[in-house]
Amino acid sequence: MQVERVKYIIWAADMDRAVNFYRDVFGGEVTRRSEVVSEVVIGGAIIGIHGGGEGKKTWTGLSFQVPDVVAGAREIVTAGGELTREPEPEDGEPPHLAMCVDPEGNQIMLSRKRGH
């Protein structure tokens, strides 16, 4: 089988809000935009956003590695998302994990590369 592309699909009740969130918060490049399916490339990965979502909280499995999860978590909240787990220091290291929800109810994770 020849695989041409791999993308991860999430749902959105409000396509414009979802596309703008991933573009603005994560610096994504919008490569396709329509009312039904849009695509945003972030860190070389394609996130497909499918319209028709219900806004229910849904675990996606998406994790975004960022240099500072505290600053990243603030950006998510400022952009209309929420935190379900605040970033906290662990084992004497700065916070490495924040559990978040985008404005469409998609649960995502921010992580920082650990020192060991």
Image (cartoon, rainbow, N blue to C red):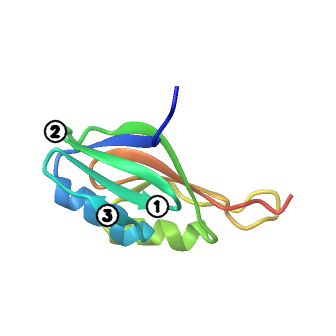
Left or right placement of residue 64 versus residue 24 in this view: right
- State which quarter of the image contains the C terminus: bottom right
Res 30 label: 3
Between residues 23 and 58, which one lies in front from this camera angle? 23
Residue 7 in sight here: yes
- Spot occupied by residue 97 in the image (x, y as percentages of width and height): 62, 55
Q: Residue at x 46, y 40 (%)?
A: 4
Given the image, on which type of amino acid does mark 3 rest? Val
Q: Is residue 67 above or below residue 61?
A: below
Q: Residue at x 51, y 32 (%)?
A: 2
Q: CA distance from mark 1 to mark 3?
A: 9 Å
Residue with the mark numbered 2: 52
Q: Residue at x 32, y 69 (%)?
A: 79
Between residues 79 and 40, which one lies in front from this camera angle? 40
- Spot occupied by residue 56 in the image (x, y as percentages of width and height): 26, 38
Residue with the mark numbered 1: 42
- Spot occupied by residue 40 in the image (x, y as percentages of width and height): 36, 58
Mark 2 neighbour class, 10 Å CA radius: few under 14, some 14 to 19, many 20 or more: some
Q: Earlier in the sequence, mark 1 or mark 3?
A: 3
Looking at the rendered structure, the secondary structure element under dot 3 is strand
Given the image, on which type of amino acid does mark 1 rest? Ile
Q: Is residue 60 above or below residue 99?
A: above
Left or right placement of residue 19 versus residue 71 in this view: left
Given the image, on which type of amino acid does mark 2 rest? Gly
Q: Nearer the viewer, mark 2 or mark 1?
A: 1
Q: Are marks 1 and 3 in contact (CB under 8 Å)?
A: no
Left or right placement of residue 54 versus residue 6 in this view: left
Looking at the rendered structure, the secondary structure element under dot 1 is strand
Q: Nearer the viewer, mark 3 or mark 2?
A: 3
